[in-house]
Image (cartoon, helix red, strand yellow):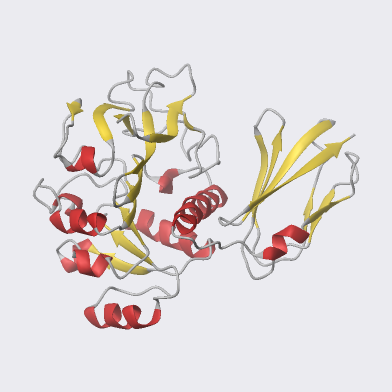
Amino acid sequence: MKSIFTSLLLFMTLMTSAQSFSILFVNDNRVNSSNTSLMLDNLTTAGYDYTIFDCAVENRTPTAAEMGLYSLVIWYCSSDGVGLQLWNGNDTDNAELMAYLENGGLLWLMGTDMLYDRYTVPTTFGQGEFAYDYLGIKEYAAQAYGDDGGLGVPQLDVQPTPVATLSPITWMFTTAWWVDGIIGRTTVQPVYKMGPESYALSQYYSAIRFDSTNTRTVSFFFDPSIMDSDAHRVELMQQVIGYFMLTIGIDQQPSILSDLTVYPQPASKESGLIIKNLPTDNLTTLKLSSVSGQTIISYCTNGESSYSLSTDKLAPGLYLLTASNGKTTKNLKVTIY
């Protein structure tokens, strides 16, 4: 259900969503509405309901009480980097967001210029500063394009983490500009690193997970709307939101995934593959990867119970088929001869 945020709707949500996982999507993007629309469409495709708080419409930040009605706050800045309500529109710490996090709130923060809106490169943070205490940032170190000789970052490479497995993240463009590179506190868990290894800023991270005493945050210092495909955005959303759901004890796994099968096995290049027993009431991302981890095919189901996959262009060998609904993952070995 998509709706503009109102006090009445908040009251109704409080009454009806206590037993469910609810999402507040904070739109803090005034410069590119098509990016917001794309993210919301993909969030719907991923299978999640949400309520929208539009900072431009409301002309303010959501309050701690308003955010506290939801299981997860997704705060989306896109490529906007001027006067963000993340910083109250005036480059100060957001006391409402801090209070929400202090009360155990979950936050997925994302945007290309959200740090640049308030800080210069480089900036080092310490105890008592929001970026350090709640996001886990030690240093805002670099920006793609601005600090790499005008190249832009070609990709982001996943790090060992329960948050996401999609890798690499690539773009609808050859490279992405103005993606932020940060250095985290020692307790931070990196999620995505600038890549590949040969890239000039590959020592920096562009997505991190940070757990503090009361809260858990995941910060993406890039805009997922410029990723290379809808299917990959949906897959990433399912993985990250699935991670948050598991942190509060909600297992969104449909047991039907255990029935998923691949036929025939082994398969010839001519025969193709049929993936059977897909859940028709739950969107599933299918990914066929080489043994080295390279993604060969990625597809997001749309309610179909089976999916036919052509193998005529695949080299003989062993592959891994991964089925994920953001709640659980099932891996199947696939052999092509």
- What residue appears at the point 15 percent right and 52 percent down from the top-left corner? 94
Image location (x, y in percent) of residue 327: 57, 57
Quadrant position of the N terminus in the picture:
bottom left
Instruction: Give the mark count.
Output: 0
- Nearest the viewer among 327 and 311 is 327
Q: Nearer the viewer, residue 210 or 195?
A: 210
Q: Position of residue 255 (x, y in %)?
A: 68, 64
Classify the position of the C terminus by image quarter.
top right
Q: Is residue 148 above or below residue 75?
A: above
* Residue 64 in the figure: left or right of residue 202: left
Query: Residue, x 32% and y 53% (percent of image)?
Result: 76
Rendered residue at 55%/36% (across/down): 167
In the image, residue 94 above or below residue 249: above
Image-quadrant location for residue 275 = bottom right
Q: Position of residue 38 (x, y in %)?
A: 43, 57
Q: Residue at x 18, y 68 (%)?
A: 58
